[in-house]
């Protein structure tokens, strides 16, 4: 895919959305595992299947519906992504972050992401939440690889503050007001779909990771390149490999994601009322 092809596809997708949505929200919220019920508490104004948006990938993961919503959440109009795209599904990181570029093209300023993650730092228990302060992207193919998209950002973007300090401060204040434990930590990306080995987890702990997962990082890189403000919150759905001595399963991930759903929803509602 050449620079021109990719840029043209971004433009075409953005134009399709503007043909439906007259007033573009400032924020896009990406729902991770367990947060689907949040949309039941929002006023949905528009629901656009990904399959109808030109060049949007398709979601293949159970629990990712594949809908772009325009909704009012806690009084704030926002895009809501019900389902995201992953490298392990067979997509390139450029494909997985296509929606981020489309949001930037539309003029969206803030990207708020949630995800499910394995806990490396044992001070965090399964079903608790962690705001991502930084990430380790060593295993992530950069979504910026190839010709630079000059209209979005520079060739060699700074990554000192990928995650916006003010947004982190706001959500921490929200959690404190609600009495919801909200840890802070570094999120490490791995490609998946297999879970990490105990040796890999030991290596990631040595590198300074507090949690590990298979999403979010490529999206955060593309968003920061596009000068979007980024916030990301992980639900710690299980202890990472080798910590509990038990085998990992997607069923455990979904069970704990659902267990944390009440807190996750309350936190996001409070956050959106504060921005």
Image (cartoon, rainbow, N blue to C red):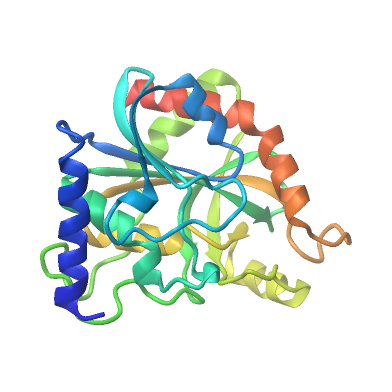
Tell me how many marks there are: 0
Q: Relative to residue 25, is residue 211 depicted above or below?
A: below
Between 50 and 191, the one lying in front of the other is 50
Name the outermost residue toward the right.
245
Rendered location of residue 88, percent (x, y): 55, 70
Q: Can the viewer see residue 124?
A: no
Q: Position of residue 260 (x, y in %)?
A: 66, 34
Is residue 190 rendered to the left or right of residue 126?
A: left
- Residue at (88, 59) in percent of width and height: 246
Q: In the rendered view, would you say 5 is above or below 21?
A: below
- Give the answer, above or below, for where 172 lies relative to 228: above
For residue 18, say whether it is visible: yes
Of the pair 206 and 125, the residue shown nearer to us: 125
Tell whether 77 sits left or right of 272: left
Q: Quadrant of the N terminus?
A: bottom left
- The location of residue 90, given as percent across then percent down, is 50, 73
- Percent position (x, y) of residue 40? 51, 23
Closest to the observer, 161 or 70: 70
Instruction: Residue at 56%, 36% (x, y): give it.
Output: 35
Query: Residue at image x 14%, y 75%?
Result: 4
Residue displayed at 22% across by 58% down:
226
């Amino acid at each position: 895919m050449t620079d021109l092809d990719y840029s043209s596809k971004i433009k075409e997708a953005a134009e399709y959305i503007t043909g439906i949505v007259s007033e573009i929200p400032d924020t896009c919220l990406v729902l991770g595992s367990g947060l689907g019920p949040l949309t039941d508490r929002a006023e949905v104004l528009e629901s656009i299947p990904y399959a109808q948006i030109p060049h949007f990938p398709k979601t293949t993961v159970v629990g990712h519906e594949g809908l772009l919503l325009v909704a009012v959440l806690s009084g704030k109009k926002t895009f809501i992504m019900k389902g995201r795209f992953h490298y392990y599904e067979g997509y390139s990181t450029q494909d997985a972050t296509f929606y981020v570029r489309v949001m930037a093209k539309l003029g969206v300023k803030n990207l708020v992401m949630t995800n499910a993650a394995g806990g490396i730092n044992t001070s965090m228990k399964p079903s608790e939440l962690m705001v991502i302060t930084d990430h380790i992207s060593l295993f992530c193919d950069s979504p910026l690889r190839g010709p630079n998209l000059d209209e979005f950002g520079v060739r060699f973007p700074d990554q000192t503050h990928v995650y916006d300090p003010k947004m982190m401060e706001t959500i921490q204040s929200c959690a404190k007001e609600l009495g919801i434990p909200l840890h802070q930590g570094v999120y490490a990306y791995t490609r998946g779909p297999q879970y990490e080995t105990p040796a890999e987890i030991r290596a990631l702990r040595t590198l300074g990771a507090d949690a590990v997962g298979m999403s979010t990082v490529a999206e955060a890189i593309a968003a920061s390149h596009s000068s979007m403000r980024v916030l990301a919150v992980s639900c710690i759905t299980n202890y990472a490999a080798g910590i509990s001595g038990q085998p990992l399963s997607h069923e455990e991930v979904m069970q704990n994601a659902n267990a944390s759903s009440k807190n996750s929803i309350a936190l996001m509602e409070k956050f959106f009322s504060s921005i």
